[in-house]
Amino acid sequence: MSHAHHPNRGSHGFWPRKRAKRETPKVRRWPASNDDQPKIQGFVGYKVGMTHGFIVDYRKRSTTSGMEVVVPVTVVETPPVMVCGIRLYSNSENGLQTLGEVWAEKQDKHLERRISLPKEKKAKDMEELSCKDPDDVRILVHTKPAQVTGIPKKKPEIMELRIGGSSIDKRLDYAMGLLGKEMRVNEFTQEGAMVDVLAVTKGKGFQGHVKRFGVKLLSHKNSKHRRMIGTLGPWHPAFVLSTVPQAGQTGYHQRTEYNKRILKIGKNPDEINPKGGFLHYGLVRNDYVLFHGSIPGPTKRLIRMRDAIRFKRDKVSTVELSYISTQSKQGA
């Protein structure tokens, strides 16, 4: 007699399912850049909320290709970030090794809330940095959450952004030109481009088997409960396998959404601010980015972007966006 077979419930691609160590996502891989000029390969923003808009469908394989369609849109506020340092790396058998770093002379006063700043400035740091032979150049940037309406904090987040394209010497010169200056999102990407979005998902706490893995409810004739698993496994091996769905932490995991299309990069927030502001966020007051579809995380969550690492199709220069809904999100 044949036995019923089905794949395991829930993905084990990320395991164990425990809370993320930090709310600021960590970029573990950066794509190779073939650009002739050096460029920044990442940026950061804050998730505002969602709305909808009308676009001309740019997907060639879609049944509505070339037609005007309604699509969900996610708004991410991208205020300028400050370049506070440069860090050089060299390739080794054990991965990337730090060669050296240099910090800007003037730092934001709120940066000391996050890290301890060096008190003594060395004038030879720039000269020593340029004499080294690095394999990778990255800049240290920090956010300015005090400039954002919906983020009630002053402590900035600090992170690395890779400089790609061209030669190492040009990358280093480009990074030195950015040191101590503000950087905007249009220096990272353009409208119609594909990017990867990294964020920590919405936390849901300790949840049971059904909500966590989506297992089937037991029969209503079950002697104990319905929202549980039927068995923990066989007698041997004499331990519970990791593939058995069990209750535990759900959500608040770092996840990466690949190939998200940028519909628009705007500087005038009045074009998207709804009446009464966005729910649980307020009004957008800085540069913003509109993404096609949804992205991980709740409102106010820090969002990191990088160049698409898996995108292989034809690039779309611009997307024809004819309308963005600014109706109130407060309800009728």
Image (spheres, rainbow, N blue to C red):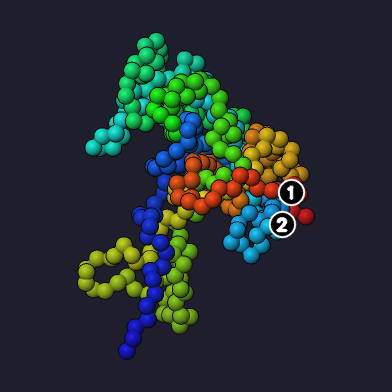
Quadrant into which the C terminus falls = bottom right
The crowd level at tag 1 (other Cα within 10 Å; few <14, some 14-19, many 20+) is few
Badge 1 marks a residue whose secondary structure is strand
Residue at the image point whose x is 50% and y is 23% from the top:
178
Say whether residue 2 is left or right of residue 331. left
Q: Which amino acid does label 2 sit on?
A: Glu
Say whether residue 177 is left or right of residue 242. right
x, y percent for residue 175: 46, 24
Residue at the image point whose x is 37% and y is 78% from the top:
5
Cβ atoms under marks 2 and 1 closer than 8 Å: yes
Vertical relation: 142 (above or below) 313: above
x, y percent for residue 289: 62, 41
**Based on the displayed image, in which of its 4 quarters is residue 135 positioned?**
top left
Q: Observer-nearest residue: 113 or 295?
A: 295
Residue identifier under label 2: 68
Quadrant into which the N terminus falls = bottom left
Residue identifier under label 1: 322
Work out whether mark 2 precedes mark 1 in sequence or the reverse, and give the earlier one.
Answer: 2
Vertical relation: 243 (above or below) 160: below
Badge 2 marks a residue whose secondary structure is strand
x, y percent for residue 301: 54, 43
